[in-house]
Amino acid sequence: MNLTKKQIRKGDAKGAIPDRETVLRFIAENPNRASKRDIAKAFSLKGQDRIDLKLLLKDLENDGLLEKRRKTLVRPGSLPPGTVLEIVAREDDGSLMARPSEWPHDGSVAPAVRIRAERPAKNRKRGPAPSVGDQVLARIAQNDDPADAPFTGRIMKVLERSKGFTLGVFRSTPGGGGRIEPVERRDKEILIAPDDVGKAKDGDLVEVQSARTGRHGLNRGKIQDVVGSVASERAISTIALHAHGIPHVFPPAVLDEATKADHATMKNREDWRKIPLVTIDPADAKDHDDAVFAEADDNPENRGGVIVYVAIADVAWYVRPDSALDREAFKRGNSVYFPDRVVPMLPERISNDLCSLKEGVDRPALALRMIFNHDGRKIGHTFHRVMMKSAARLAYAQAQQAIDGHPDDKTGTLLDGVLKPLWHAYGVLKKGRDRRQPLDLDLPERKIRLNDDGSVADVIVPDRLDAHRLIEEFMIQANVAAAESLERKRQPLIYRIHDEPSLAKQEALRDFLKTLNMSLSKGNLRSNSFNGILAGARDKPYETMVSEMVLRSQSQAVYSPDNIGHFGLNLRKYAHFTSPIRRYADLIVHRALIAAYGLGEGGVTAREEENLEEIAAEISAFERRAMAAERDTVDRLIAHHLADRVGEIFNGQISGVTKSGLFVSLPQFGADGFVPVSTLGLDYYIYDESHQAMVGEKSGMGYRLGDCVEVRLAEAIPLAGALRFEMLSEGRKLPTATRSFHKANSSSRKQRGSVRRGRRRG
């Protein structure tokens, strides 16, 4: 768990000497600023305290717990901030793994480094993207993710290249041969000789092996594989699938196993078919894996209490450990959702048929019955393996309209007996949620709607309804119950964990909030520490800016067999249980519950229990892979949509500030584009990280995260999903603190390397 300011001191007094463990944790979290001076400054140590710190650090060195590299102290086995790495593998999620080229520690394995991917628009042209076998110089940082490699690296320079593969579109030329238009902006075009075209046709998405021919001119290459045509409706998502290595074709053995699957029986099941459970999902949902019902508790000792029923598709009945279906599901990790299609974790025979809780059809489920008192406190729950029959399939908007007084023919018959009791139960559970105060970061989610030809029709922000919140809260409570029950049974499981923000991220957020005369409490943080900040910024010009910075300060949620709680939800025990059709983690939790309660066939195996750590790490990586592929596809679709509108003017908002320039988002499209700092104007611009601003050295005018601006679309690169903007809005006078920053730093701009010379816009 990351260090907080309260934890870094021995007692509450400012400036007290930290203990050994706290110093070691600080050094581990801050590998780039861990000299004696840095440590003394971080803990506010002066005078005699600095001398005591020096003795403490010497003791740690003598005990072999610290090493001194130049002026910086590091943990043994750690890496210096700048390290030469050799890229040794490409993971299934498309990311690169590397290890130090030289490792002096006898008998130990060199630590793994995950190369951090950079969005194409952030980078200046650097030649072809790095690949397996390349030797690179990278900036190293400790990884906050406990389920990932111990270090992450950002490539500073490619020192030596090996021959690699490039993904791109083949463009034929008269007379034979052609060129490869790469899908990654950092890659260069590749010449293809007539003899090296193979079976590729103009417009095909292909994989090419390139051979560098010299410092100048284009590389030459040979087409190795034809992936598909970019003229197809699914071309954009196909690029993402191939680029990220996501399996999307089910092997024959998997399809055969799915086809032969038979309906579940009543063996070891309770009959819940008369309970009017209903599914409430998006209107276009094809699979339905959760159903709900609620009623008032008639127990006189629980006046005002409610009983909530949640039934989840019994995927474990059909997908048994080590079967072909199971191996393929683990290989995928989760379903991947693109605007034009879904790449499911399980074949449609399972996901859309046998395990989908269809209206009026008998379906097996793993269910639970939860009892809450009048103020939303859970007083008990039980798990059951059941046969159910959904009373109705409802859409979110449909259910909400019924509650709001506009029922249709279907919801009218369900209003009094099903829908009103559900909403009453939600009101009771909401009392508990409000008392718990999870992180209240409710950013809008945009949805792309496509035309029949696969092009973008429009981008919408669906309304956030109480129907959404109801299902979300019922599912959260079910996930909590699963974790609690498995712990009570001493059954190993995979938790969904979310660590608190690292010390470095906390301090970065505090520095930023100071510029708005806001503050983040020190000491042990909880999720509601951020809710006060979000509430204070509500309806202010900087509301979006503050929300974005709070989001960036958060750690990434992962899967793990070791529980540290869920910081964002403010829950001590949490496990994913409610979506086994689309998440492998939930399937493992189902199997664990079946084994723990003796509910029949399909329980977790001893081999799975032994490998939970490996399974959790893999599915965490697969989740990141899916998120990256989904994000890349949206970027490419929007770039295609705007490719014919180059030169048009748009209203946007600054969504990111870097040394290289500004990211501007277009809210109506959910798209981000880049404004290079070299195009901002005649002034010198200084990047002020703590204020998230770009400040003109002479004028004091500048741009800041959250500013509303007007931009012109200068370039759209559809295959790379990249947009480049020209800034039309003039900078504004920034707060005094920011102006004093740029004055103090202007004399040392060359040494800082944070200044770019502007040029006149053309």
Image: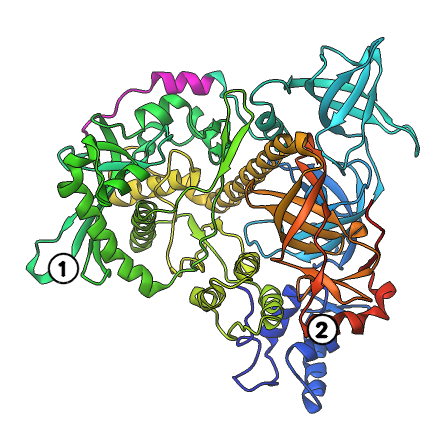
622 and 293: which is toward the camera = 293
Q: In the rendered view, would you say 482 is above or below 526?
A: above
Q: Residue at x 24, y 55 (%)?
A: 427
Q: Residue at x 74, y 35 (%)?
A: 185
* Magenta-tinted stretch: 253-267
697 and 492: which is toward the camera = 697
* Residue corresponding to mark 1: 304
Residue 120: x %, y % from top left? 71, 41
Q: Nearer the viewer, mark 2 or mark 1?
A: 1
Q: Secondary structure at mark 1?
A: loop
Residue 114 seen in render: no
Q: In the rendered view, would you say 620 is above or below 285?
A: below
Q: Residue at x 46, y 45 (%)?
A: 612
* Residue corresponding to mark 2: 61
Q: Residue furthest bottom?
A: 48
Q: In the rendered view, would you say 457 is above or below 442?
A: above
